[in-house]
Amino acid sequence: MNNPYYLTAFIDEQGQRRPFNLKIEGPFATSESGNFYCRVKSPELLGKDFNIYGDSGSQTKELALKLVEICLRDKKVYDAEGNALVLELWE
């Protein structure tokens, strides 16, 4: 099962607008434990890729999105026109 989440936007950090790219791949089933994981990619925010694990596909997607929200902290996310975006769980 792979249902990726993509976002190309901008973040406002200390009054500076800069590019923000996010890709969450998965969820994928692990072969050994029956759990799932998502791969979170956001070079501007995280610097490197992270695998987030959970008991189910839906839990894993929630945890991956939560990681991004925590890392964003007080940063605002905007589209190209300057409209504020809210990160939402995807189907």
Image (spheres, rainbow, N blue to C red):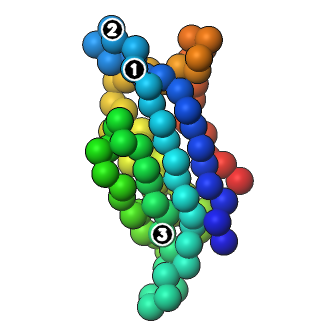
Q: Residue at x 60, y 49 (%)?
A: 5
The residue wearing badge 2 is: 15
* Tag 3 secondary structure: strand
Decide if residue 70 is in sight here: no
Q: How many numbered badges does the structure rendering display?
A: 3
**Are dots 3 and 1 in contact, CB under 8 Å?**
no
Q: CA distance from mark 2 to mark 1?
A: 10 Å
What is the three-letter code of the residue carrying label 2?
Gly
Seen in the picture, residue 18 relative to 73 is either above or below; the reply is: above
The residue wearing badge 1 is: 18
Q: Closer to the camera, 18 or 68?
A: 18
The residue wearing badge 3 is: 37
Q: Earlier in the sequence, mark 2 or mark 3?
A: 2
Q: Residue at x 49, y 82 (%)?
A: 30
**Are dots 2 and 1 in contact, CB under 8 Å?**
no
**Can you say which quadrant of the picture contains the N terminus?**
bottom right
Q: Residue at x 55, y 78 (%)?
A: 29
Pinpoint residue 11: horizontal percent, then vertical percent.
43, 22
**Are dots 2 and 3 in contact, CB under 8 Å?**
no
Q: CA distance from mark 3 to mark 1?
A: 29 Å
Quadrant position of residue 47: top left
Seen in the picture, residue 74 relative to 91 is either above or below; the reply is: above
* Tag 2 secondary structure: loop
* Tag 1 secondary structure: strand
Seen in the picture, residue 72 relative to 68 is either above or below; the reply is: above
Residue farthest to the right?
Answer: 91
